[in-house]
Each structure stands twice: as C-alpha cells, then as structure tokens.
Image (tube, rainbow, N blue to C red):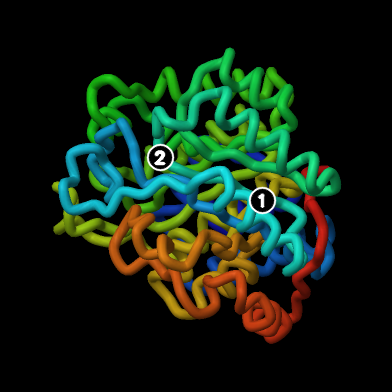
Amino acid sequence: MKVSEIIEKLNTTHTAARGELIFLLENITDDEREMLRKAAQRTAREVFGKKIYIRGLIEISSVCKNDCLYCGLRRSNQNAVRYRLSAEQILSSCDLGYLLGFRTFVLQGGEDGFFTDGVMCGIVREIKRRYPDCAITLSLGERGEESFKKLREAGADRYLLRHETADPAHYAKLHPANLTAQERQRQLFALKEIGFQTGAGFMVGSPYQTVENLADDLLFIERLRPQMCGIGPFIPHKDTEFRDKPQGSLELTLTLLSVLRLMNPHILLPATTALGTIHPKGREMGILHGANVVMPNLSPKEHRKDYSLYDNKICTGDEAAECIRCLAARMRSIGYEIVTDRGDYK
C-alpha cells in the first residue's frame, strides 16, 4: 500500500477503505501532502471555479443548557458572559449583511430555551419576508424532528449540526452523559429527511481522538452525504477541564480538508474561524486545500468577544463583516473571488 496510490484512488473514485484512510493519515509525507492538496484544489476549482461563498454569521445567544466538556459556553462555566440577541438585533444584523452583499445568514447559538419554535419561526419568517432571495442557515443544536419540521416550514433552508466525532465511546469522553453520538447522528439523518441542506462536521485533535476516530469521521460523512461539512482544529478554553490539552494540528486539519474535498467533490466546505485563529493565514490555507466557504461575523460588535467557544477566537479586524473588503482582498491574493450568491449545494 502506498499513500500516493490512495490519493489517486480518492481522486478518481472519491472513496477509500477505512484501513486506507488510516494508513494515509499515519504515513503521508510532505511531498504527498502537497500532491493531495493540489488534487483537492483542482477538484474544488472544477466544481466551483474561483468562487468563494460568504455566509454572514450571527451568534444569537451565548446561553446553553448543555455542559459539553470542551466548550467555553458550557452551562457550568461561571466565567462565561451570557447574552441573548433580541429579534430586532438579529434583523438589524441581517439588514447590515444584505447591504454588504451577504445572501446567506447563519443564525448560531447555544441550546437556549428562550428561542422556542414560536420565537425562531417568527424570526425566520421575517428574514424571509425582508429578503426572499437569501438563504437562512440555523445552527442551534439538537431540537428534535418536530422542531426541525416547523423551522423548515417557516422558511429555514439549511441546518448545521456538527456530529463532533462518529465514535460513541469518544463522544462520551467529550460530552455529559445525557448527550450521545447515536442521538446526534439520528437527528442529522432526520434533518436530511425533512429537506434541509444539512451540515455535519468534527473537531480535529480533540482530547482522546485517535487516527481511527478520524477515519470513522470521514466514513460517516460519506454515509450521511451532507451538503456541508465544517471541520476545525480543537482549541482549548481556559474555563474547561480540557484547558491544558494540546491544540489540534493545522497541518492535519488541512490534510483532512483535502481528503474531504476528494471524497465529496460538491460539498460546501468552510475555511473555519478556528483555522484563522491558530494561523494568521489559516483561512487562505484552507481555501488552497479545497475549502470554498468563509463565514465573516455579522454579530453586533459588543457581543463578538462574548461568544467564546474557545480561547483567542478572532472577532475583530478581518473577521468583522464591516471589513469584508479586506477579506475579499485576501482571497484575491490567492487567486479567488468572493461572490454575492446564496451558494446553494448543487
């Protein structure tokens, strides 16, 4: 078995066996990593050209009922700054975003009981009324099938729900006992069945993760066939018990982005904020490894630093939507262009 042969198999058949994925991740050399990157970039260019889709991220609440061990917003973190945007603040963020050229709004938050189906459906309907040419993506955790159906009927187009890790035993090491990998995966398949463009994703380098876990994550994505997949390096938060765990690897994250692109040529693949947090050109590197989406922050300035999932999260400068021209210039510097487009999965 040779890594170069596995890369060629991924490039031509868009699949690989579990053992092949493990072998690639354990043995890939720098030269082979560049071979993989070029193949992934070429595939992304064939499908999307030089277009980079932008999503306006609105972080609507730092309140969360869950106690996930890695997350700065976890319920038991007494140092977290809690806020909740009003419907008016959310709509004002959309108003600004539309003027800046955004045609997708991503409403993301902790699992906050204030945002009932009635409240969220009302917000979704009003965004759609104002901006019928825009897509609405929700990322609000596990809400259950009846809630998902109501949100879809109200006009939401997409739903992001990272599976975090496909292995139930590993999942249990990262989450409290009331949350399970099986239920998370069940809800992901339900989202697809209901008709959402669905996004999954996982952390790279999370505590206790093995290369076998990563291979299983790649194969879970292959089985689920989501329209979107968000991956980023694990970054510890000072107010969690994982505060002293090592940060996820930039190099490994980029390698996995390239593998995901070859296994799923049409998938919408973000160069995540976490990548930009661990390296000043992390998002550009993500694009060059096969990603095709960036998600600048549209949240009110006074709350950006309060949505603290992990330490040192970028929330000013190029991450601010007001500096969209700066981000466009950064994409042009590597041969890509930001486009005003809903950027639907095709």
Specify few, some or many for label 1: CA neighbours under 10 Å numbering under 14, 14-19, or 20 or more: many
Instruction: From the top left corner, tell me how far across and down residue 60 is, in percent.
Output: 48, 47
Instruction: From the top left corner, tell me how far across and down residue 288 is, in percent.
Output: 64, 71
Between 164 and 151, the one lying in front of the other is: 151
Q: In the rendered image, is residue 42 in sight?
A: no
Q: Is residue 201 left or right of residue 263?
A: left
Q: Residue at x 23, y 22 (%)?
A: 177
Dot 2 or dot 1: first in sequence order is: 1
Residue 56, by quadrant, is bottom right
Q: What secondary structure is marked by label 1?
A: strand
Q: Residue at x 69, y 19 (%)?
A: 194
Residue type at tag 1: Phe
- Circle 1 is placed at which residue position? 105
Task: Please count the marks in the image.
Answer: 2
Between 241 and 205, the one lying in front of the other is: 241
Residue 103, by quadrant, is bottom right
Q: CA distance from mark 2 to mark 1?
A: 17 Å
Vertical placement of residue 324 versus 105, above or below: below
- Circle 2 is placed at which residue position? 110
Q: What secondary structure is marked by label 2?
A: loop
Between 308 and 18, the one lying in front of the other is: 308
Instruction: From the top left corner, tell me how far across and down residue 307 is, in percent.
Output: 38, 55
Residue type at tag 2: Gly
Q: Residue at x 63, y 28 (%)?
A: 121
Instruction: From the top left corner, tell me how far across and down residue 15 is, in percent.
Output: 65, 40
Vertical placement of residue 182 versus 236, above or below: above
